[in-house]
Image (cartoon, rainbow, N blue to C red):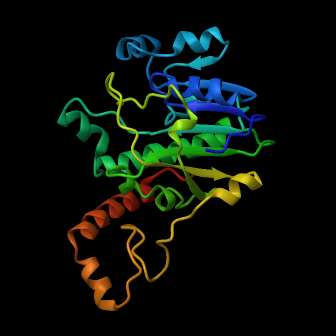
Amino acid sequence: MYLDPKWRILTVGDGDLSFSRALLTHHRPRLLEASVYDSEATLLAKYAENELEALRERNIHVHTGLDITDPTSVQSIEKKFDLVIFQFPLIPSFATLDDFERHSADASTNTLNRKLLRQFLIHSFRYLLDEAGPRMCYITSKEVKPYRDWNIETSLNRGLEFPCLGSVPFEYDKFPGYRIRNVNRDRVVPDTESRTFVWGSNPPPELKAALKTTPFLGAAYCEICRVGPFVADEDRSKHLRSKRHRKMQVFEDQWSRYLESAVPI
């Protein structure tokens, strides 16, 4: 993860705030503000070990109850940042089937997570990133199911004027003290292979040189399943009939229906 010490940074959805504290301690950005989706009371009740007071003692502004999907909530923060970071985003689990159905309509949790990330990007560029700065967004996600099935590099770009520029491996050892939390309870999850995906209008040369883009593009590949190249039409046909592809196609069709019904940007 490339971090310029001159940047003004906002972290989004930082559960127990351990990423923000590690970022502050080991990278010392010019300005850091942190945010969590939970209210302060919920944060303290959910995470026995948290960094709220430690950050406040160092005069870091922590925004509690920030809903990145809600423009009104997002606009409560001043538009002054160079970089907005969302680490390991994941929608909370639903308490009941009825609750899920109220929120999901025709969508699966796959679509709901893509929707969360797309709204993060739209609202960050619209309301949080300073027009005079580099205007960067980072999303760090795991390279395992179900996270890989979101197709972050390609699916979120549809209809956006700021495409994904590529990704870099996320190096856990650069953030000592960072605890990756379960979204719903006080539990640390394994630090499996992960990547940080980058959006921005003016990336620094050092970052631009380090970025890798997906190789699974073009007629010889299946972009949504990340497989190929196919050496013959028979190989492609066999893949298209596979259970894996049919499942991923359902996700892509749901995503397309969501985009068609979404409010224009």
Name the residue nearer the viewer: 35 or 101.
Answer: 35
Residue 51 in percent (x, y) is at: 51, 16
Q: Quick check: 68 left or right of 231? A: right
The quadrant where residue 91 appears: top left
Q: Is residue 244 above or below residue 151?
A: below
In the image, what residue occupies the spot 25% across and 38% down? 100
Residue that protrudes farthest toward the front in the picture:
173
| Of the pair 160 and 148, the residue shown nearer to us | 148
- The picture places residue 193, in percent across and down from the top left corner, at 42, 48
Task: Give the image location of residue 113, x and y in percent.
Answer: 39, 45
Query: In the shown orientation, is residue 69 left or right of residue 21?
Result: left
Q: Is residue 237 above or below residue 74?
A: below
Residue 137, above or below 34: below
Residue 62 or 131: which is nearer the viewer? 62
Q: Residue at x 38, y 84 (%)?
A: 230
In percent of width and height, residue 45 lies at: 36, 11
In the displayed structure, 17 sits above or below 7; it is above
Residue at point 76%, 55% (across, down)? 205
Assign the N terminus to one quadrant of the image.
top right
Q: Where on the picture, by quarter, is residue 249? A: bottom left
Q: Is residue 201 visible?
A: no
Quadrant assignment, res 8: top right
